[in-house]
Amino acid sequence: MARPFRRWLHNAMPLLAAIGIGAVVVWQAASLGRSGAMTSATAHGFQRLRLYSSTIVNALERYSYLPFMLAHDGKVRALLADQTDPVRLRAVDEWLEGANAAAGSTALYIENLEGTAIAASNWREPDTYVGHRYEFRPFFKDAISTGGGRWFGVGVTTRIPGYFLARAVLDGDSPQGVAIVKVDLEQLQREWASGGEKVMVTDIHNIAILTSQPDWKYAVLGTLDAEARATLDATQQYADVPLRSVKVIQSRDIEKDVHILTLETDGRRRSYLVQSAAIPGESWTIHYLTDMNDILAGSRNAAIIAAFGWIIVLLLLLFLRQRFLRIVAQAKARDEVAEALRTARDELELTVAKRTADLQAEIEERLRTERELRDAQTELVHAGKMAALGQMSATVAHELSQPLTAVQTYLASARVFAQRGDLGQVFRNLGLIDDLNQRMGHIASHLKTFSRKGGSRREPVLLAEVAKRAMMLVEARAKSEKAIIVCDIPPDACILGDGIRLEQVIVNLFGNALDAVKACQVKRLSMTAEASEGTWVIKVADNGPGIAPEHVEHVFDPFFTTKEVGEGLGIGLSLSESIIRDIGGSMRAENAPGGGAVFVITLPEHSPAPAPGGGSHG
Ligand code: ADP
């Protein structure tokens, strides 16, 4: 077997099994339904058969006394004795007419020994029996020979079917004539038809003589043999009524008196469950027919119900299977999620461990780099210091070599003037040497500032005090140069720092400002302080030419100066900036919009401000 087919078979197996079981269930239900329907139809049929059979017997028995009564009546006997007396004839006719109406029979009549009707209840009617001969009728013959007869047949005169009950009118033992009652049984079959049931009474030749189905009336079940035909012709039992044949296609015995017959009438086939019973006292058989379609409908309904039931069971099974599969899938999904979470957690732990190791390595690397950087910086600082020292040495040597050479020259020439006795020149030279000395002292004082490290003292310092003392230090120079210094410092302006070093800074700024306004006609210097966002902003300004834009960035660089040799060393601002930074502030240089330079110092505010004079500034 090819593999795909085997796989298909494996997949389709449950479906095939469901279809197979369903088919068995439906088939079983159908056969159960069918046998159930058959059983109940059979029980019902027999019950109806008994009922109808007794109805027929009763209907006939009701009239059985009538011929007997007629046969014993004196008028009848007298008439048979003298059949020509018209008065007697009329009297009997009228009597029969009255008795017939009272009994509800179809007709009452008297026949003489030839079988001619001499008196009848229908004597007034055009198709009266009176005058007709009926000696060929079996009941007549039976009555003459045995004293009584009964027979079913169609009237040759009236064409009306009826049941004939006959009784011989006896004079001693010899028959004089026959008294007959004709009974109509058509009413019975009308009642059956109105009940919607299929009932049929057949005679000895299988001819339907009474039936609830009008189209079966006088139909022959099967075929008539020649003997039967001859008998019928002789007795004119069904007069000239045409006898149709109902073809029996199939006959199956189920049990005694129960068959399934398939009949064909007018080209149509139909199957019936036929139950039969002999009618007591007659040569007739009564049949009760149930359409097999009705029985099969029951089995069909059972099969449909079973099919639906099976579909519902299947759907239920499918639903349960789906539910089961879903639960299994959910459990599987949960396991998978848990597994995925476990894997993710393991991976995360691994990643974290790896990252931690990497970070540690990185930190170690950074620490090593920092260490190396620090070492490099130390080396750089050292190199910078050496370079600065070299530059400073060169500057100092340069600054001092000129005055020293000049001092040597003036001393040599003073010696010459002293030998000559020119004291005036000697004093002039001494004065020049003094000037040079002062200049060298000035240079030394600048260098001293470098060495004077104030340390990082932190104490409350009032800015007004600092300004006041700085002013005092530059007062003499300002006065000699006719410069005005304006100070506007709030008395509570207080910072935390080193008062003396801050004073050095302000004195240096004033000094630079005085240098800058040297060429100005009006020389104005100012110092202000303003509070701003937890800081004090101190501004030292002048009305000099300001700082050239290209120099603004460099004025704080060490040894940056625009002044002539001997005028400046270029270290004042660099020093001032480092002092301010030391006490936690910052410093910048800018030009005022109206001209002149402005140096802006920002220092953190200190509060509460100490009482005036409480600051320590030596
Ligand atoms: P020095 O005064 O010895 O030059 P500083 O560091 O004090 O050194 O000053 C550096 C330079 O900054 C000065 O040479 C000058 O060019 C400039 N400078 C400083 N103050 C002023 C000012 N008030 N106006 C204009 N330029 C200034």
Image (cartoon, grey):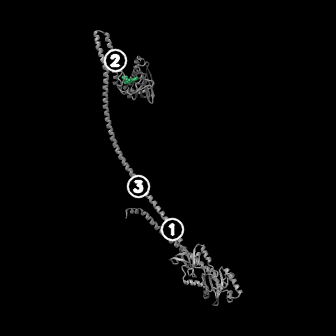
Q: Is mark 1 within 8 Å of ligand 1?
A: no
The reply to whether callout 1 and callout 3 are in contact (CB within 8 Å) is no
Q: In the picture shown, does residue 219 fall above or below 497?
A: below
Image coordinates of residue 206 in percent, x first then y, are: 55, 80
How far apart marks 3 and 2 lie (CA) works out to 101 Å
Residue 438's disc number? 2
How far apart marks 1 and 3 lie (CA) works out to 44 Å
Q: Can residue 500 be seen here? A: no
Mark 3 nearby-residue class (10 Å; few <14, some 14–19, many ≥20): few
For badge 3, the amino acid type reads: Lys
Image coordinates of residue 88 in percent, x first then y, are: 70, 86
Residue 302's disc number? 1
Farthest residue to the top: give it. Answer: 421
Q: In the picture shown, does residue 136 fall above or below 552?
A: below
Q: Residue at x 57, y 84 (%)?
A: 231
In the rendered view of the protein, which quadrant contains the C terminus?
Answer: top left
Mark 1 nearby-residue class (10 Å; few <14, some 14–19, many ≥20): many
Given this view, does label 1 or label 3 mark the residue nearer the observer?
A: 1
Residue at image mark 3: 332
Image coordinates of residue 126 in percent, x first then y, are: 68, 81
Q: In the picture shown, does residue 615 fall above or below 60?
A: above
In the rendered view of the protein, which quadrant contains the N terminus?
Answer: bottom left
For badge 2, the amino acid type reads: Gln
**SS at circle 2:** helix
Q: Is mark 3 within 8 Å of ligand 1?
A: no
Q: Quadrant of residue 225?
A: bottom right
Say which label, 1 or 3, has the lower sequence index. Answer: 1
Say which label, 3 or 2, has the lower sequence index. Answer: 3
**SS at circle 1:** helix
Image coordinates of residue 506 in percent, x first then y, are: 40, 23
For badge 1, the amino acid type reads: Ala
